[in-house]
Structures are given as structure tokens and as C-alpha cells.
Image (spheres, helix red, strand yellow):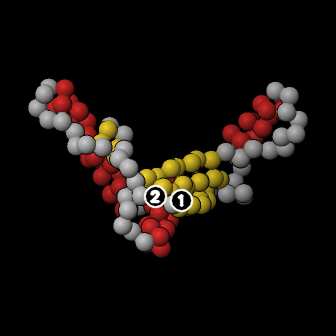
Amino acid sequence: MAARVGVARGMVRLEAQIHAVGTEKRQGALTAPPGYLRTGYTGGSAMKAQIYVTLKKTVLDPQGATIARALQGMGHPEIAGVRQGKFFEIDIAGGASKEALSAGLNRIAEDVLANPVIEEFRVEILD
């Protein structure tokens, strides 16, 4: 829980700093560093990672069931079921080994992106 609180506070602080830079830029006092926008770093990256978060098979997925019924009602009788989830694409700066990167991303997914009680996740590192 401490990791989630720390990350949340860090994100709020980062958002506040980015917002302050944008406000001061409009006033002509300061400009944002190159490669940064309100949503975060947008510069080139050495690698990308994809993290898929889905509900565990033992957890009911009412949203997925609703989507499946809607698709069947739209004339797609071949749809037997749908399970919905979340997808994250992460840009990674170079310098870290794949093993260290994989361990860090798994920790991020478990601590921040997924609820390990009801969700499972899969991390893929792309070159």
C-alpha cells in the first residue's frame, strides 16, 4: 500500500509541476523542457513495453458479458463470450538490461496497474 501512495503522490506532484510549467509558459516566464507535454515525456525511446491487465478467469466480467450480448444482437452469433481488460503501452529510455526492466515492470504492474486480488497481468518488452 505504501508503494501505491508514494506513486500516487509522485504523480500528483509531477502533474502539478507540469501544470505549473504550462501556466508560467502562458505568462511568458518559463517554457517546458524539450520532449515534455502535459501528459508526460514524448521523446524518442529505446524500447517499448506493453502491459495487458485482465480480470482473473474466476472473476465475473459483467461488462464483457454485456459487450458479448450487444455483439450477438448486432448480428454476430459466432461471438461466444468477451472478457474486457486494460492495455498500457510504455516508452522506456535506454540503459537498463531486459532482466532488470522486466522485474521493474512486473513490480509496477502488480503495485500500480493491476489489482492482484481480481486481476492478472502480462508484460511484453518490445525492441
Foreground: 75 or 13?
A: 75
x, y (%) of residue 113?
49, 54
Residue 63 found in image quarter: top right
Tell me the quarter of the picture where residue 17 sits.
top left
Q: Amino acid at mark 2?
A: Met
Residue in the picture at 28% in, 46% down: 14
Residue 126 shows which numbered tag? Answer: 1
Quadrant in the picture for the N terminus? bottom left
From the viewer's perspective, is residue 54 above or below residue 107?
A: above
* Of the pair 83 and 1, the residue shown nearer to us: 83
Which residue bears the numbered disc 2? 47
Which residue reaches farthest right? 77
Helix, strand or loop for disc 2: strand
In screen coordinates, is 47 left or right of 2?
A: right
As displayed, is residue 84 above or below residue 52? above
Lateral position of residue 105 relative to residue 16, left or right: right
